[in-house]
Amino acid sequence: MTERSFRIIVISLLVLNIFLIGALAGGGLTWVRSTQNKAESLPLAGEQLPSGQRAAFRQALNDARKADRPSILEAQQAKIDAASLLGQPNLDTAALSAALARARDADMALRERIEQRAVDFAATLSYDERRALAESLIRRNAPKPAATK
């Protein structure tokens, strides 16, 4: 083996090892972050309900979202339009404001319909189940303690 081919092999192996070490470190860091996020994530609304009611509650909200798919698509398109307008050389502030207003109106209409579906579902629950739902909503919306570094 010549000195030149030996150097090429050594350099290739060093580059490969550096790549592998970086991949392992990145994978480990991703794994650590994902496990931390799961531990710190907010509780879901309705988690305190009995399993049958919890599934029915989530299904009711999913059905409301599916029924309002046109509103979701309208809001997404309005946001895409706003981003497109922002990327133009000359900013048309009136058109940008109109696109953002369309997105906001569609988002608010969707939220209103989903919340109304949640109200309709809550009307079918017993007092204890409504209390459990209220507790999960309070826990979900409670202020999160400041992260310390």
Image: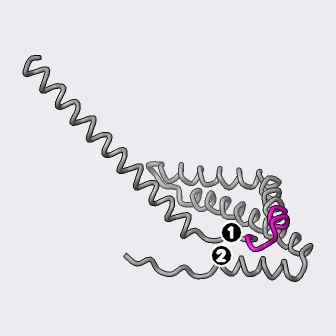
* Distance Cα–Cα, label 2 vs label 1: 7 Å
Q: Is residue 146 left or right of residue 48?
A: left
Q: Is residue 130 left or right of residue 82?
A: right
Is residue 6 shown in magenta?
no
Q: Secondary structure at mark 2?
A: helix
Q: At 88% from the left edge and 71% from the top edge, which residue is drawn? A: 120
In which quadrant will I find the C terminus? Answer: bottom left
Label 1, on which residue?
Answer: 44
Q: Which residues are magenta?
A: 47-57
Q: Nearer the viewer, residue 61 or 101?
A: 61
Is residue 49 shown in magenta?
yes
Q: At 68% from the left edge and 68% from the top edge, which residue is drawn? A: 44
- x, y (%) of residue 51? 81, 65
Identify which amino acid the numbered label 1 is placed on. Leu
Q: Give the main secondary structure, helix, strand or loop, of the magenta stretch.
A: helix
- x, y (%) of residue 22? 32, 46
Q: Answer yes or no: do the residues labelled 2 and 1 have beta carbons within 8 Å?
A: yes
- Relative to 131, residue 64 above or below: above
Identify which amino acid the numbered label 2 is placed on. Arg
Precedes in sequence: disc 2 or disc 1: 1
Query: Residue farthest to the front?
Result: 1
Q: Residues within 10 Å of mark 1 (few under 14, many from 20)?
A: few
Label 2, on which residue?
Answer: 140
Q: At 58% from the left edge and 68% from the top edge, which residue is drawn? A: 41
Q: At 9% from the left edge and 21% from the top edge, which residue is drawn? A: 4
In which quadrant will I find the N terminus? Answer: top left
- x, y (%) of residue 8? 16, 25
- x, y (%) of residue 47? 73, 70
